[in-house]
Amino acid sequence: MQINNPKFEVSAVSPKQYPNENLPEIVLVGRSNVGKSSFINALVNRKNLARTSSEPR
Ligand SMILES: Nc1nc2c(ncn2[C@@H]2O[C@H](COP(=O)(O)OP(=O)(O)OP(=O)(O)O)[C@@H](O)[C@H]2O)c(=O)[nH]1
Ligand SMILES: [Mg+2]
């Protein structure tokens, strides 16, 4: 899979903030500190696009 130019769009807390592009969406769910942000960074090949917490629990 090739991902070009990944960027953080928005952290939305209400529906009117949701992005308007008609792109496919992916849901990623998991308890806190399980590695969701690290997984995103691995996918897009960036160290810190998604902020990770410092300590694994
Ligand atoms: N040992 C180990 N540690 C991991 C792995 N993936 C992530 N971590 C570590 O676990 C910690 C938490 O990872 P995050 O990616 O921030 O977890 P998160 O699910 O996004 O956490 P929240 O944003 O708090 O919900 C970090 O210190 C990561 O380095 C893994 O596969 N193995
Ligand atoms: Mg996270």
Image (cartoon, helix red, strand yellow):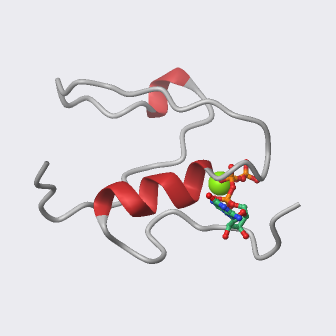
Number of labels in the image equals 0
**Looking at the image, is 57 positioned above or below residue 27?**
below
Q: Position of residue 19 (x, y in %)?
A: 33, 34
Residue at horizontal 26 percent and vertical 29 percent from the top:
20
| Residue 29 as seen in the image, left or right of residue 18 | right
Q: Position of residue 4 (x, y in %)?
A: 12, 61
**Looking at the image, is 25 positioned above or below residue 39?**
above
| Residue 39 as seen in the image, left or right of residue 57 | left
Q: Position of residue 17 (x, y in %)?
A: 46, 34
Residue at horizontal 44 percent and vertical 77 percent from the top:
47
**Looking at the image, is 4 positioned above or below residue 36?**
below
Q: Nearer the viewer, residue 28 or 56?
A: 56
> Splitting the image into four quadrants, where does ligand 2 fall?
bottom right
Identify the image quadrant of residue 23: top left
Q: Position of residue 31 (x, y in %)?
A: 78, 37
Residue at horizontal 16 percent and vertical 56 percent from the top:
3
Identify the image quadrant of residue 43: bottom left
**Is the C terminus in the top left, top right, bottom left or bottom right quadrant?**
bottom right
Residue projecting furthest to the right: 57
Residue at horizontal 64 percent and vertical 67 percent from the top:
52
